[in-house]
Amino acid sequence: MTEIVLVGAAGRMGRAVMEAMGESPDLRLKACVDRAPQPGGNAVPWGEDAAAFIARGDVVIEFGTAAAAEGAARAAAAAGAGLVSGSTGLSTAAEALLREVSARVPVVRSANFSIGILALRAALNAALAILPEGFDVEIIERHHRTKQDSPSGTALLLATDVARGRGVATPALKHGRQGSAGAARPSGEIGIHAVRGGDWVGDHTLLLGGMGEWLELRHVAQSRRAFAEGALAAARFVARAVPGLYTLEDVMAARSR
Ligand code: NAD
């Protein structure tokens, strides 16, 4: 039985993880961490300070904010607990902290825990291997009106995949387009367009445009359950892993072994 400490428990993702845990007899929700007060009907130990609940061998699942991610990482490392980190919009320093912490405890970090996005990325890699470099790439992402970070962590991940697929270390991003371009669209540029509104869970479209033809690859998350299931798979992986920084690909590869 793996004991889970859930950080960001009152949030949309926290609630989705709790719901998915209800069908996971191998995982026990030990404690909930959130700044928000404990909702009625929740009988699990609840507080603001992750460190107060985490013990060696536990797994911390975190979907909160940048501050929550950093706090959870420090507390997990201090206690010797594994970490599943899902918050997006982290600073470079916060990402560096996660890498530092992974020298001491196993950490799975992903901007998107849905298995469909893994398949989208594999399809993207396959397309890039076939298409000439001259195909232009534009990424359109759509999320609910309260999403804090733009563009989404997943859009940035996809842009990095495109750049890597073309042998470029850092993607040349163009966020939105307005006004006169003055010249033709630079080859190799990756356009990113963030759409915000309503309660849209998460939608990523990759457009690959050539002369006379277009290709469109799209993933739509209709429910946060898609992310929650991936996060629980990551928690099971982390419970058995040695310290290191892992991706969702590592989790899925271990599942199929
Ligand atoms: P949300 O705003 O609904 O929930 C965030 C929760 O974190 C809130 O309950 C808030 O009170 C709590 N919180 C804020 N600061 C805290 C702190 N210091 N310590 C503990 N709790 C704190 O947001 P959400 O939609 O649940 O998303 C949370 C994060 O997860 C965002 O960064 C989002 O982009 C990301 N996300 C990641 C994935 C993925 O697959 N990796 C999927 C969906 C969302």
Image (spheres, helix red, strand yellow):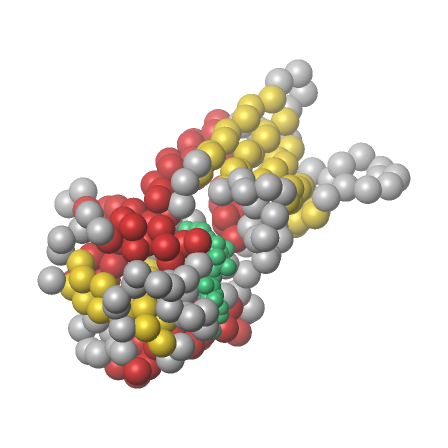
Residue at the far front in the pictured view = 40
Answer whether residue 141 is visible to the viewer in this image.
Answer: no
Q: Is residue 226 above or below residue 45?
A: above
Q: In the image shown, does 14 or 249 lie closer to the viewer?
A: 14
Left or right of residue 60, residue 221 in this image = right
x then y, percent, for residue 35: 45, 72
Q: In the image shown, does 232 or 135 lie closer to the viewer?
A: 232
Which residue corresponds to the image point at 70% horizontal and 47% vertical from the top-left? 174
x then y, percent, for residue 231: 31, 53
Answer whether residue 38 is visible to the viewer in this image.
Answer: yes
x then y, percent, for residue 122: 39, 36
**Figure label count:** 0
Which residue corresponds to the image point at 50% horizontal and 29% vertical from the top-left? 217
x then y, percent, for residue 116: 38, 37
Q: In the image shown, does 84 or 209 lie closer to the viewer?
A: 84
Left or right of residue 175, residue 163 in this image = left
Q: Is residue 209 above or below residue 118?
A: above
Q: Quadrant of the C terminus?
A: top left
Q: Quadrant of the N terminus?
A: bottom left
